Amino acid sequence: MDEATTQSLAPETKGVSEKFRRELVISGYSPRTIKMYSMYVNAFLKHSGKNPETAGRDDVVAFLASMKEKGASNATLALVHAALKFLFHNILKLKIIDEIKTPKKAKYLPTVLTKEEVRALLKAAGKGRNRLLLQFIYSSGVRVSEAVNMRAEDINFKERIGKVKSGKGSKDRIIILSRNWCRPAKKYADGKKVKSPFLFSKKNGKQFSPDMVQRLVKRSAMKAGLQKEVTPHTLRHSFATHLLEAGENIRKIQELLGHSSLNTTQIYTHVSTEQLKKVESPLDSL
């Protein structure tokens, strides 16, 4: 879609589109974000039909309204708004986006597994590499992209810590490793027949893809008979919630998750059912 849209742009507009993409690259945005932002900006440029230098507030509002009328969610509109803000502020040097408001994104509580459900999921993954991979995501709270990009050289089994390099927001951070995970994981890493720089790899030594991990989690959840919608990110949510329920400091959890804002981590205070169950109803003290 993005490539076809780019091809249909006027030469001067195509130049702005390419400059926009390059600026995102050198600013450290992830390939996925660059792809999405470029797609939305190209769609806007085509929709306005103007030289980007002459585009204004009304063009942005008209584009956002057209997307909303086509069924775009509030979350999508927020993403489009962010992409257009980068275009106008960083490329066109026009401050017109801040005054244009989009509907607030709906806030949903994340799906969290109980400890019993986590045990069932891990058991269903089978022995060996697959179970170790899911254990790693749950026990360290990493994102699926961070798990598949994790290199063996960044794991210290003796100290039981690892380093996530250039995670979301291009920030390095330290993660914890489970004592029960380290010994079998080291045995797996040392016993690979085909060496690979990645901690987890296919038999031919090649890197896992996030989609492969998604499918592994889905298969394991079905085999375990879990009724919830389970993804690799569910394990990350469960990691944070279970630490909070165990009384761990929320700022430490923020560091382990790699959240830039404590507000992002605060959502886990809303899903910690163990803490809620400790609250006594006022009826019981009448």
Image: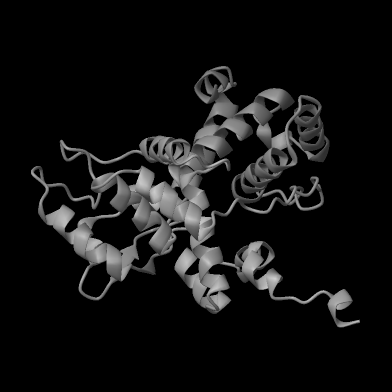
Q: What is the number of callouts on the image?
A: 0
Q: Is residue 140 above or below residue 234?
A: below
170 vs 72, nearest the viewer? 72
- Quarter of the rendering containing residue 194: top left
Image location (x, y in percent) of residue 155: 24, 64
Residue 53 in view of the camera: yes
Apparent side of residue 35 relative to residue 106 in the rendered image (left or right)? left
Single out the residue that lies furthest toward the right: 286
Q: Is residue 49 among the parts visible in the rendering?
A: no
Judge from the rendering whether residue 259 lies leftward or rightward of residue 97; answer left or right. Answer: left
Q: Where, by quadrant of the figure, is residue 153 drawn?
A: bottom left
Q: In the image, residue 66 lies at what x, y percent?
A: 79, 27
Which residue sits furthest left? 193
Please, which colouring scheme is shown?
Answer: one colour
Q: Is residue 265 or residue 42 the one in the foreground? A: 265
Q: Is residue 281 above or below residue 128?
A: below
**x then y, percent, for residue 138:** 42, 57
At horizontal 63% and vertical 43% (from top left) the residue drawn is: 83
Residue 200 location in percent, x, y?
25, 48
Quadrant of image for the C terminus: bottom right
Describe residue 110's horizontal placement relative to residue 7 as left or right: right
Taking the image as shown, residue 110 lies to the left or right of residue 224, namely: right
Instruction: Give me the residue at 42% from left, 54% from top.
Output: 119
Residue at 33% from the left image edge and 47% from the top image edge: 148
Residue found at x 16% / y 54% = 189
Quadrant of the drawing holding the N terminus = top right
